[in-house]
Amino acid sequence: MARETTYLELSQEDGGAHKFYEVTVDGTSVSVRYGRIGADGQLQSSSFPTIEKARAAAAKKVGEKVRKGYAPAVRGVRAARSVTRRQVTSTPSTARAVAPVLWRFRTGSSAFGIHVDEDRCWVGNQAGDVYTVSHEGEVLARYSLPDGVKCLVADEFWIYAGCDDGTVYDLSSKVPFGAYDIAADVDIFWLDIREGVLNVSDRNGGLTVIDHEDEFQWSRRSAGPNAWMVRADERAVYHGHGKGVTAYAPDGGRELWHTQTDGSVLFGWQEDHAVYAGTGRNTVQRLSKATGALEATYRCDAAVYSCATSPDGRHVFAGDLASSVYCFDADGRRLWKLGTGSGAALSMQYLDERLYLVTTDGSLVCVDASEAAIAAAREGSVPTAVDVKSAAALPVFTPAATPAAVATVSVASVPAGGVVVECVQQGQRMRVQVVSGGFEPSWNVQFPRGIREPGARYVVDGLHPAAGGFYRVRGEIRRLV
Protein backbone atom coordinates (compact mmCIF):
# COMPACT_ATOMS: atom_id res chain seq x y z
CA MET A 1 0.00 0.00 0.00
CA ALA A 2 1.29 3.48 -0.92
CA ARG A 3 2.23 5.94 1.82
CA GLU A 4 -0.62 8.42 2.43
CA THR A 5 -0.22 11.84 4.06
CA THR A 6 -2.90 14.33 5.08
CA TYR A 7 -1.72 17.84 5.97
CA LEU A 8 -4.02 20.28 7.79
CA GLU A 9 -3.63 23.81 9.17
CA LEU A 10 -5.55 26.00 11.58
CA SER A 11 -4.70 29.67 11.09
CA GLN A 12 -7.35 31.99 12.47
CA GLU A 13 -7.70 35.57 11.21
CA ASP A 14 -7.52 37.00 14.72
CA GLY A 15 -4.21 35.21 15.33
CA GLY A 16 -5.72 32.93 17.95
CA ALA A 17 -4.15 29.83 16.38
CA HIS A 18 -1.38 29.17 13.88
CA LYS A 19 -0.84 25.41 13.91
CA PHE A 20 -0.46 22.42 11.60
CA TYR A 21 -1.38 18.75 11.95
CA GLU A 22 -0.04 16.06 9.61
CA VAL A 23 -1.07 12.39 9.60
CA THR A 24 0.85 9.78 7.60
CA VAL A 25 -0.21 6.16 7.08
CA ASP A 26 2.53 3.78 5.99
CA GLY A 27 1.30 0.19 6.06
CA THR A 28 0.32 -0.59 9.63
CA SER A 29 2.12 2.49 11.04
CA VAL A 30 0.54 5.89 11.70
CA SER A 31 2.70 8.91 12.42
CA VAL A 32 1.43 12.29 13.55
CA ARG A 33 3.45 15.49 13.28
CA TYR A 34 2.05 18.67 14.83
CA GLY A 35 3.13 22.09 15.99
CA ARG A 36 3.41 25.73 14.99
CA ILE A 37 3.24 26.54 11.29
CA GLY A 38 6.78 26.98 9.99
CA ALA A 39 8.35 24.79 12.70
CA ASP A 40 9.37 21.12 12.45
CA GLY A 41 6.92 20.26 15.21
CA GLN A 42 6.79 17.11 17.30
CA LEU A 43 6.44 13.59 15.93
CA GLN A 44 4.65 10.57 17.41
CA SER A 45 4.14 7.14 15.84
CA SER A 46 1.84 4.21 16.54
CA SER A 47 1.53 0.67 15.13
CA PHE A 48 -1.69 -1.28 14.48
CA PRO A 49 -2.43 -4.98 13.85
CA THR A 50 -3.73 -4.43 10.32
CA ILE A 51 -3.62 -1.85 7.53
CA GLU A 52 -7.37 -1.34 7.87
CA LYS A 53 -7.10 -0.45 11.55
CA ALA A 54 -4.21 1.91 10.84
CA ARG A 55 -6.23 3.74 8.17
CA ALA A 56 -9.28 3.90 10.46
CA ALA A 57 -7.19 5.40 13.28
CA ALA A 58 -5.71 7.98 10.91
CA ALA A 59 -9.16 8.90 9.57
CA LYS A 60 -10.42 9.39 13.14
CA LYS A 61 -7.51 11.73 13.96
CA VAL A 62 -8.08 13.78 10.82
CA GLY A 63 -11.82 13.95 11.46
CA GLU A 64 -11.30 15.24 14.99
CA LYS A 65 -9.07 18.05 13.72
CA VAL A 66 -11.42 19.01 10.90
CA ARG A 67 -14.26 19.34 13.40
CA LYS A 68 -12.05 21.72 15.38
CA GLY A 69 -11.57 23.96 12.34
CA TYR A 70 -8.45 22.57 10.69
CA ALA A 71 -8.53 22.50 6.89
CA PRO A 72 -6.42 20.88 4.14
CA ALA A 73 -3.42 23.03 3.20
CA VAL A 74 -0.08 22.98 1.43
CA ARG A 75 2.97 22.98 3.68
CA GLY A 76 5.13 26.10 3.28
CA VAL A 77 2.48 28.45 1.90
CA ARG A 78 1.76 30.13 5.24
CA ALA A 79 4.71 31.75 6.98
CA ALA A 80 5.81 30.96 10.51
CA ARG A 81 4.92 33.32 13.35
CA SER A 82 7.14 36.38 13.70
CA VAL A 83 9.84 35.89 16.33
CA THR A 84 12.29 38.60 17.33
CA ARG A 85 15.30 37.37 19.22
CA ARG A 86 16.65 40.19 21.34
CA GLN A 87 19.82 41.50 19.73
CA VAL A 88 22.19 42.64 22.44
CA THR A 89 25.81 43.70 22.54
CA SER A 90 28.17 43.23 25.43
CA THR A 91 31.44 45.06 25.92
CA PRO A 92 34.08 44.67 28.65
CA SER A 93 33.40 46.46 31.91
CA THR A 94 35.24 49.69 32.71
CA ALA A 95 34.91 49.00 36.44
CA ARG A 96 38.21 48.77 38.33
CA ALA A 97 37.08 45.75 40.34
CA VAL A 98 35.15 42.55 39.70
CA ALA A 99 32.04 41.59 41.64
CA PRO A 100 32.43 38.96 44.39
CA VAL A 101 31.03 36.02 42.43
CA LEU A 102 30.39 32.95 44.60
CA TRP A 103 29.55 30.57 41.77
CA ARG A 104 28.78 30.55 38.07
CA PHE A 105 26.84 28.05 35.96
CA ARG A 106 27.29 28.22 32.19
CA THR A 107 24.14 27.05 30.37
CA GLY A 108 25.68 27.11 26.89
CA SER A 109 23.44 29.77 25.32
CA SER A 110 22.55 33.40 25.96
CA ALA A 111 20.11 33.57 28.87
CA PHE A 112 17.20 35.96 29.51
CA GLY A 113 15.03 34.06 31.96
CA ILE A 114 15.59 34.04 35.71
CA HIS A 115 13.51 33.35 38.80
CA VAL A 116 14.84 32.94 42.34
CA ASP A 117 12.77 31.70 45.28
CA GLU A 118 13.52 30.33 48.73
CA ASP A 119 14.18 26.83 47.39
CA ARG A 120 16.14 27.24 44.17
CA CYS A 121 17.17 29.35 41.19
CA TRP A 122 15.76 28.98 37.69
CA VAL A 123 17.54 30.00 34.48
CA GLY A 124 16.19 29.76 30.92
CA ASN A 125 18.28 30.24 27.78
CA GLN A 126 17.90 30.79 24.06
CA ALA A 127 18.38 27.07 23.34
CA GLY A 128 15.12 26.26 25.15
CA ASP A 129 16.81 24.84 28.23
CA VAL A 130 15.60 25.70 31.73
CA TYR A 131 17.81 24.60 34.62
CA THR A 132 17.10 24.58 38.33
CA VAL A 133 20.07 25.23 40.59
CA SER A 134 20.35 25.23 44.37
CA HIS A 135 21.47 28.38 46.17
CA GLU A 136 24.80 26.68 46.80
CA GLY A 137 25.34 26.01 43.10
CA GLU A 138 24.19 22.39 42.63
CA VAL A 139 22.37 21.75 39.33
CA LEU A 140 19.15 19.92 40.18
CA ALA A 141 17.24 19.36 36.93
CA ARG A 142 16.77 20.46 33.32
CA TYR A 143 13.59 21.17 31.37
CA SER A 144 13.98 20.83 27.59
CA LEU A 145 11.46 23.10 25.81
CA PRO A 146 10.82 23.29 22.04
CA ASP A 147 12.06 26.86 21.54
CA GLY A 148 14.10 29.68 23.07
CA VAL A 149 13.05 30.95 26.51
CA LYS A 150 12.11 34.65 26.54
CA CYS A 151 11.54 34.91 30.28
CA LEU A 152 10.57 33.07 33.47
CA VAL A 153 7.73 34.35 35.66
CA ALA A 154 6.20 33.12 38.91
CA ASP A 155 2.63 33.20 40.17
CA GLU A 156 2.45 32.02 43.78
CA PHE A 157 4.02 28.53 43.72
CA TRP A 158 3.84 28.14 39.93
CA ILE A 159 6.67 28.83 37.49
CA TYR A 160 6.02 29.63 33.83
CA ALA A 161 8.43 29.87 30.89
CA GLY A 162 7.49 32.02 27.91
CA CYS A 163 9.04 30.68 24.70
CA ASP A 164 9.65 31.98 21.19
CA ASP A 165 7.14 29.47 19.79
CA GLY A 166 4.33 31.42 21.47
CA THR A 167 3.67 28.86 24.17
CA VAL A 168 3.92 29.58 27.89
CA TYR A 169 4.84 26.38 29.72
CA ASP A 170 3.93 25.50 33.30
CA LEU A 171 7.08 24.06 34.90
CA SER A 172 5.59 23.41 38.31
CA SER A 173 5.57 19.62 38.02
CA LYS A 174 7.95 17.06 36.54
CA VAL A 175 6.16 17.06 33.18
CA PRO A 176 5.84 20.64 31.86
CA PHE A 177 2.77 21.53 29.82
CA GLY A 178 1.62 24.39 27.61
CA ALA A 179 -0.66 26.51 29.80
CA TYR A 180 -1.08 29.44 27.41
CA ASP A 181 -0.93 29.68 23.62
CA ILE A 182 -0.21 33.24 22.47
CA ALA A 183 -1.70 34.45 19.18
CA ALA A 184 0.53 34.13 16.12
CA ASP A 185 0.42 37.86 15.34
CA VAL A 186 1.92 38.71 18.75
CA ASP A 187 5.73 38.88 18.59
CA ILE A 188 6.41 38.28 22.29
CA PHE A 189 8.96 40.46 24.07
CA TRP A 190 8.09 40.01 27.76
CA LEU A 191 5.54 38.41 30.11
CA ASP A 192 4.12 38.79 33.58
CA ILE A 193 1.45 36.74 35.35
CA ARG A 194 -0.77 37.38 38.35
CA GLU A 195 -3.55 35.15 39.71
CA GLY A 196 -3.55 33.16 36.48
CA VAL A 197 -3.92 36.23 34.23
CA LEU A 198 -1.11 36.43 31.69
CA ASN A 199 0.09 39.82 30.42
CA VAL A 200 2.08 39.87 27.18
CA SER A 201 4.04 42.83 25.79
CA ASP A 202 5.25 42.72 22.20
CA ARG A 203 7.45 44.16 19.48
CA ASN A 204 4.80 46.56 18.20
CA GLY A 205 4.13 48.12 21.60
CA GLY A 206 1.04 46.00 22.14
CA LEU A 207 -0.27 44.61 25.42
CA THR A 208 -2.37 41.43 25.37
CA VAL A 209 -4.11 39.97 28.42
CA ILE A 210 -5.17 36.29 28.61
CA ASP A 211 -7.03 34.55 31.43
CA HIS A 212 -6.20 31.27 33.19
CA GLU A 213 -8.12 29.20 30.62
CA ASP A 214 -6.02 30.62 27.79
CA GLU A 215 -8.84 32.86 26.57
CA PHE A 216 -8.25 36.37 25.26
CA GLN A 217 -9.47 39.14 27.57
CA TRP A 218 -8.32 42.48 26.17
CA SER A 219 -5.51 44.28 24.36
CA ARG A 220 -4.18 47.82 24.06
CA ARG A 221 -1.59 49.52 21.89
CA SER A 222 0.79 51.89 23.66
CA ALA A 223 2.42 54.93 22.05
CA GLY A 224 5.86 53.37 21.52
CA PRO A 225 7.18 50.13 19.95
CA ASN A 226 9.49 47.48 21.43
CA ALA A 227 7.66 46.84 24.70
CA TRP A 228 10.30 45.10 26.83
CA MET A 229 8.47 45.68 30.11
CA VAL A 230 5.19 44.46 31.55
CA ARG A 231 4.40 44.19 35.27
CA ALA A 232 1.04 43.76 36.97
CA ASP A 233 -0.58 44.08 40.39
CA GLU A 234 -4.12 44.45 41.71
CA ARG A 235 -4.22 48.12 40.70
CA ALA A 236 -2.87 48.17 37.15
CA VAL A 237 -0.82 46.67 34.35
CA TYR A 238 2.40 48.67 33.80
CA HIS A 239 3.61 48.62 30.19
CA GLY A 240 7.11 49.88 29.30
CA HIS A 241 7.98 50.63 25.67
CA GLY A 242 9.85 53.00 23.35
CA LYS A 243 7.98 56.07 24.60
CA GLY A 244 7.98 55.40 28.33
CA VAL A 245 5.68 53.60 30.76
CA THR A 246 1.87 53.45 30.50
CA ALA A 247 -0.42 52.11 33.23
CA TYR A 248 -3.77 50.54 32.34
CA ALA A 249 -6.69 49.51 34.53
CA PRO A 250 -6.69 45.73 35.23
CA ASP A 251 -9.76 45.26 33.02
CA GLY A 252 -8.19 47.26 30.18
CA GLY A 253 -10.99 49.78 30.30
CA ARG A 254 -8.84 52.87 30.48
CA GLU A 255 -5.37 54.34 30.63
CA LEU A 256 -4.50 55.42 34.18
CA TRP A 257 -1.34 57.39 33.43
CA HIS A 258 1.58 57.69 31.03
CA THR A 259 5.11 58.88 31.84
CA GLN A 260 7.78 59.53 29.25
CA THR A 261 11.09 58.08 30.40
CA ASP A 262 14.63 59.19 29.64
CA GLY A 263 15.09 56.79 26.73
CA SER A 264 13.35 53.62 25.56
CA VAL A 265 12.45 51.13 28.28
CA LEU A 266 14.60 47.99 28.03
CA PHE A 267 13.61 46.31 31.30
CA GLY A 268 11.17 46.71 34.17
CA TRP A 269 10.89 45.84 37.85
CA GLN A 270 8.21 46.48 40.46
CA GLU A 271 7.87 46.87 44.20
CA ASP A 272 4.71 47.55 46.21
CA HIS A 273 4.48 51.28 45.49
CA ALA A 274 6.78 51.87 42.53
CA VAL A 275 7.88 50.54 39.15
CA TYR A 276 11.49 50.77 37.94
CA ALA A 277 12.31 51.25 34.25
CA GLY A 278 15.79 50.56 32.89
CA THR A 279 16.37 52.64 29.75
CA GLY A 280 18.59 52.91 26.72
CA ARG A 281 19.90 56.25 27.97
CA ASN A 282 21.87 54.79 30.87
CA THR A 283 19.27 55.24 33.61
CA VAL A 284 16.91 53.42 35.90
CA GLN A 285 13.89 55.56 36.75
CA ARG A 286 11.53 54.97 39.68
CA LEU A 287 7.90 55.88 38.99
CA SER A 288 5.00 56.07 41.44
CA LYS A 289 2.45 53.34 40.78
CA ALA A 290 -0.33 55.65 41.93
CA THR A 291 0.39 58.63 39.67
CA GLY A 292 3.29 57.79 37.36
CA ALA A 293 5.33 60.63 38.85
CA LEU A 294 9.10 60.36 38.56
CA GLU A 295 10.46 59.75 42.08
CA ALA A 296 14.15 59.02 41.53
CA THR A 297 16.76 58.48 38.82
CA TYR A 298 19.72 56.07 39.04
CA ARG A 299 22.45 56.91 36.52
CA CYS A 300 24.71 54.28 34.97
CA ASP A 301 27.50 54.61 32.37
CA ALA A 302 25.85 52.63 29.54
CA ALA A 303 22.43 51.42 28.40
CA VAL A 304 20.63 49.49 31.15
CA TYR A 305 19.66 45.92 30.23
CA SER A 306 18.28 44.86 33.63
CA CYS A 307 17.44 46.09 37.11
CA ALA A 308 16.13 44.84 40.47
CA THR A 309 15.76 45.99 44.05
CA SER A 310 16.07 44.65 47.55
CA PRO A 311 12.59 43.86 48.93
CA ASP A 312 12.24 47.14 50.79
CA GLY A 313 13.57 49.24 47.90
CA ARG A 314 16.50 50.26 50.07
CA HIS A 315 18.96 49.28 47.34
CA VAL A 316 18.52 49.43 43.57
CA PHE A 317 20.67 47.26 41.28
CA ALA A 318 21.29 47.65 37.55
CA GLY A 319 23.20 45.84 34.81
CA ASP A 320 24.46 47.63 31.70
CA LEU A 321 25.61 46.60 28.23
CA ALA A 322 29.24 47.11 29.31
CA SER A 323 29.17 44.06 31.60
CA SER A 324 28.95 46.13 34.78
CA VAL A 325 26.60 45.80 37.73
CA TYR A 326 25.67 48.75 39.94
CA CYS A 327 24.14 49.37 43.35
CA PHE A 328 22.41 52.61 44.38
CA ASP A 329 20.69 53.77 47.54
CA ALA A 330 16.98 54.58 47.38
CA ASP A 331 17.61 58.25 46.59
CA GLY A 332 19.85 57.56 43.58
CA ARG A 333 23.37 57.80 45.04
CA ARG A 334 25.71 55.30 43.41
CA LEU A 335 27.25 53.01 46.02
CA TRP A 336 29.34 50.81 43.76
CA LYS A 337 30.05 49.63 40.21
CA LEU A 338 31.73 46.28 39.55
CA GLY A 339 32.39 44.03 36.56
CA THR A 340 30.29 40.86 36.20
CA GLY A 341 33.11 38.77 34.73
CA SER A 342 30.47 37.03 32.56
CA GLY A 343 29.14 39.55 30.05
CA ALA A 344 26.15 41.87 30.33
CA ALA A 345 23.37 40.99 32.78
CA LEU A 346 20.17 40.54 30.75
CA SER A 347 18.01 39.91 33.83
CA MET A 348 18.56 39.83 37.57
CA GLN A 349 16.98 39.17 40.95
CA TYR A 350 18.00 39.85 44.55
CA LEU A 351 17.44 37.52 47.52
CA ASP A 352 19.01 37.40 50.98
CA GLU A 353 22.05 39.58 50.25
CA ARG A 354 22.78 37.75 47.01
CA LEU A 355 22.32 39.14 43.52
CA TYR A 356 21.59 36.58 40.81
CA LEU A 357 22.33 37.48 37.18
CA VAL A 358 21.77 35.81 33.80
CA THR A 359 24.10 37.04 31.12
CA THR A 360 24.94 37.33 27.44
CA ASP A 361 27.38 34.41 27.67
CA GLY A 362 24.61 32.19 29.06
CA SER A 363 25.76 32.16 32.67
CA LEU A 364 23.73 32.13 35.87
CA VAL A 365 25.91 34.11 38.27
CA CYS A 366 25.54 34.33 42.04
CA VAL A 367 27.08 37.51 43.50
CA ASP A 368 27.65 38.07 47.22
CA ALA A 369 25.91 41.46 47.64
CA SER A 370 26.53 41.82 51.37
CA GLU A 371 28.15 45.08 52.46
CA ALA A 372 31.27 43.28 53.71
CA ALA A 373 31.78 41.36 50.46
CA ILE A 374 31.28 44.43 48.28
CA ALA A 375 33.66 46.50 50.40
CA ALA A 376 36.30 43.79 50.04
CA ALA A 377 35.70 43.59 46.27
CA ARG A 378 36.23 47.32 45.90
CA GLU A 379 39.63 46.80 47.51
CA GLY A 380 40.40 44.01 45.05
CA SER A 381 39.68 41.05 47.33
CA VAL A 382 37.11 38.64 45.87
CA PRO A 383 36.43 34.93 46.43
CA THR A 384 37.43 32.38 43.83
CA ALA A 385 34.26 31.74 41.85
CA VAL A 386 33.17 28.11 41.64
CA ASP A 387 32.41 26.98 38.09
CA VAL A 388 29.36 24.76 38.52
CA LYS A 389 29.13 21.62 36.38
CA SER A 390 25.98 19.78 35.42
CA ALA A 391 25.73 16.16 36.59
CA ALA A 392 25.94 13.48 33.92
CA ALA A 393 22.73 11.81 35.17
CA LEU A 394 20.77 15.06 35.47
CA PRO A 395 16.96 14.54 35.27
CA VAL A 396 15.56 16.01 32.04
CA PHE A 397 11.85 16.84 31.69
CA THR A 398 10.08 17.50 28.38
CA PRO A 399 6.49 18.59 27.64
CA ALA A 400 3.75 16.05 27.06
CA ALA A 401 1.58 17.68 24.42
CA THR A 402 -0.73 14.88 23.24
CA PRO A 403 -2.85 12.22 24.97
CA ALA A 404 -0.54 9.49 23.67
CA ALA A 405 2.40 11.04 25.52
CA VAL A 406 0.66 11.09 28.90
CA ALA A 407 1.11 8.23 31.37
CA THR A 408 -2.03 6.24 32.20
CA VAL A 409 -3.54 4.86 35.38
CA SER A 410 -6.44 2.45 35.88
CA VAL A 411 -9.46 3.18 38.04
CA ALA A 412 -8.31 0.55 40.52
CA SER A 413 -4.85 2.14 40.75
CA VAL A 414 -5.77 5.77 41.45
CA PRO A 415 -3.37 6.81 44.24
CA ALA A 416 -4.63 8.06 47.58
CA GLY A 417 -5.26 11.76 47.33
CA GLY A 418 -5.52 11.62 43.53
CA VAL A 419 -8.08 14.02 42.06
CA VAL A 420 -10.14 13.08 39.00
CA VAL A 421 -10.92 15.77 36.43
CA GLU A 422 -12.94 15.54 33.21
CA CYS A 423 -12.88 17.36 29.85
CA VAL A 424 -16.32 18.81 29.10
CA GLN A 425 -17.38 20.47 25.84
CA GLN A 426 -19.23 23.74 26.48
CA GLY A 427 -20.15 25.42 23.21
CA GLN A 428 -16.89 26.11 21.36
CA ARG A 429 -14.77 25.68 24.49
CA MET A 430 -13.33 22.55 26.03
CA ARG A 431 -13.42 23.03 29.81
CA VAL A 432 -11.83 20.86 32.48
CA GLN A 433 -13.89 20.31 35.63
CA VAL A 434 -13.36 18.42 38.89
CA VAL A 435 -15.14 15.08 39.31
CA SER A 436 -13.83 14.21 42.78
CA GLY A 437 -15.76 15.47 45.78
CA GLY A 438 -14.69 18.24 48.11
CA PHE A 439 -14.04 20.86 45.44
CA GLU A 440 -15.99 23.87 44.19
CA PRO A 441 -17.95 22.45 41.21
CA SER A 442 -18.32 25.79 39.41
CA TRP A 443 -14.55 26.30 39.14
CA ASN A 444 -12.63 25.09 36.09
CA VAL A 445 -9.09 23.69 36.05
CA GLN A 446 -6.09 25.23 34.29
CA PHE A 447 -5.11 22.32 32.07
CA PRO A 448 -2.94 21.59 28.98
CA ARG A 449 -4.85 22.33 25.78
CA GLY A 450 -3.00 19.67 23.84
CA ILE A 451 -4.40 16.78 25.87
CA ARG A 452 -8.03 17.92 26.19
CA GLU A 453 -10.43 15.47 24.53
CA PRO A 454 -14.23 15.33 24.95
CA GLY A 455 -15.11 13.02 27.84
CA ALA A 456 -11.50 12.20 28.70
CA ARG A 457 -10.71 11.85 32.39
CA TYR A 458 -7.38 12.47 34.08
CA VAL A 459 -5.96 11.97 37.56
CA VAL A 460 -3.76 14.66 39.10
CA ASP A 461 -1.80 14.47 42.32
CA GLY A 462 -3.63 17.49 43.69
CA LEU A 463 -5.37 20.75 42.90
CA HIS A 464 -4.71 24.13 44.44
CA PRO A 465 -7.31 26.93 44.51
CA ALA A 466 -6.14 30.17 42.90
CA ALA A 467 -7.30 33.66 43.79
CA GLY A 468 -8.92 34.10 40.38
CA GLY A 469 -11.53 31.42 41.11
CA PHE A 470 -10.01 28.36 39.40
CA TYR A 471 -7.81 25.38 40.22
CA ARG A 472 -4.18 24.81 39.33
CA VAL A 473 -2.70 21.35 38.95
CA ARG A 474 -0.22 20.13 41.55
CA GLY A 475 1.96 17.24 40.45
CA GLU A 476 1.73 14.65 37.67
CA ILE A 477 -1.14 14.34 35.17
CA ARG A 478 -2.18 10.77 34.20
CA ARG A 479 -4.96 9.65 31.90
CA LEU A 480 -7.63 7.52 33.57
CA VAL A 481 -8.29 4.30 31.63
Image (cartoon, rainbow, N blue to C red):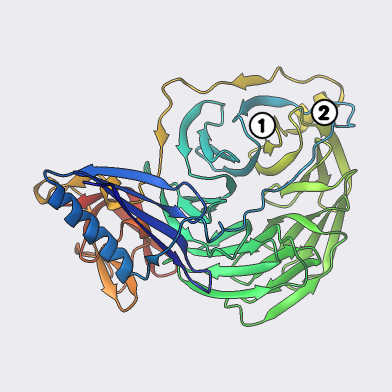
Q: Secondary structure at mark 2?
A: helix
Q: Residue furthest bottom?
A: 253
Identify which amino acid the numbered label 2 is placed on.
Ala
Q: Nearer the viewer, residue 224 or 260?
A: 224
Q: Nearer the viewer, residue 477 or 235?
A: 477
Q: Position of residue 179 (x, y in %)?
A: 43, 57
Quadrant location of residue 454?
Answer: bottom left
Q: Is any atom of residue 457 visible in this view? A: yes
Q: Secondary structure at mark 1?
A: strand
Measured in 3D between alpha carbons, the distance from the residue under mark 1 to the one under mark 2, in whole angstroms, is: 19 Å
Q: Is residue 24 left or right of residue 363?
A: left
Q: Position of residue 32 (x, y in %)?
A: 32, 49
Identify which amino acid the numbered label 1 is placed on.
Val
What number of labels is visible? 2
The residue drawn where x is 53% and y is 65% is 183
Tell me if residue 270 comes above or below residue 42 in the rendering: below
Quadrant location of residue 10?
Answer: bottom left
Tell me if residue 115 comes above or below residue 91 in the rendering: below
Q: Which residue is mark 1?
A: 365
Q: Residue furthest front?
A: 2
Query: Few, some or many C-alpha atoms within 10 Å of disc 2 (few <14, some 14-19, many ≥20)?
Result: some
Q: Which residue is mark 2?
A: 375
